[in-house]
Amino acid sequence: MHKQLKLFLTARSVLVPATAMLGPIYAIFVEKIGGDILNAGIAFAIYSIISGIGIIVMGYIENTLHKDKKFIIFGNILMSIALLGYYFVNNIYQLYLVQIILGISTIVQTPANDAFYTKYLDRQKYNLEWGIWEGSGWVVTGIAALAGAYIVKISDFKSLFLVMFFVSLIGLFLSIKLKDKK
């Protein structure tokens, strides 16, 4: 496996948990800030719909610019800002704003992540290297979900959000070390 893929997978294995820590307890957080199950659904829908439409548009834009590393880093910066934003959320409208920022971070980095990873694949090992990409994402998501629930159980959501933010910064700094393929 190419050394850039190893570094990229390491950065991703840090960034994915930063967002996944909240996953299984998201609705509980929404309730704590005065929302209900419908608000949780609306917040997730905002993130998903904005991300889905935006990724298509951004894929076209990034395909013409060929600056994958810059988009990865910018997307990771936005993700870190959004994760820190959770710390300050006190009502459902602030949560919607954080979801929009998180959606924009997903829009910016998803096509670039996929393009960057694809450029460094070994043609003889496509299935294995895509399997590592997908499988590692699921494993770290599961570990992060458990860790996030545990952090909130022994502390609170504010502590979780700070952990998410600092974990995302580690992933951001790792992604800065990536090198664009010429």
Image (spheres, rainbow, N blue to C red):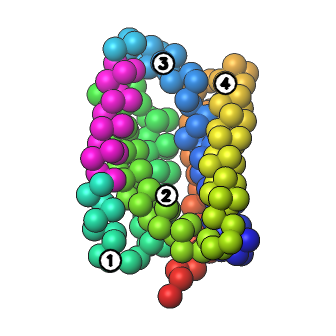
The mark that comes first in sequence, 4 or 3, is 3
Q: Residues within 10 Å of mark 4 (few under 14, many from 20)?
A: many
- Which circle, 4 or 1, is nearer the viewer? 1
Residue 27 bears which disc, if any?
3
Q: Residue at x 29, y 28 (%)?
A: 93
Q: Which element is circle 4 on? A: helix
Instruction: Give the residues in magenta.
Output: 39-55
The three-letter code of the residue at mark 4 reads Ala
In this rendered view, identify the residue nearer to me: 12 or 150.
Answer: 12
Q: Which element is circle 3 on? A: helix
Q: Which element is circle 1 on? A: helix
The three-letter code of the residue at mark 2 reads Asn
The mark that comes first in sequence, 1 or 2, is 1
Type of secondary structure dominating the magenta stretch: helix
Question: Quick check: is 47 in the magenta stretch?
Answer: yes
Mark 4 = which residue? Answer: 149
- Measured as percent of width and height from the top left, residue 14 is found at 66, 52
Q: Residues within 10 Å of mark 1 (few under 14, many from 20)?
A: few
Residue 70 quadrant: bottom left
Q: Residue at x 28, y 68 (%)?
A: 61
Q: Which element is circle 2 on? A: helix
Query: Along the horizontal axis of the image, is 40 left or right of 129?
Result: left
Q: Is residue 149 above or below residue 114?
A: above
Q: Residue at x 72, y 36 (%)?
A: 143
- Measured as percent of width and height from the top left, residue 161 is found at 56, 36
The three-letter code of the residue at mark 3 reads Ala
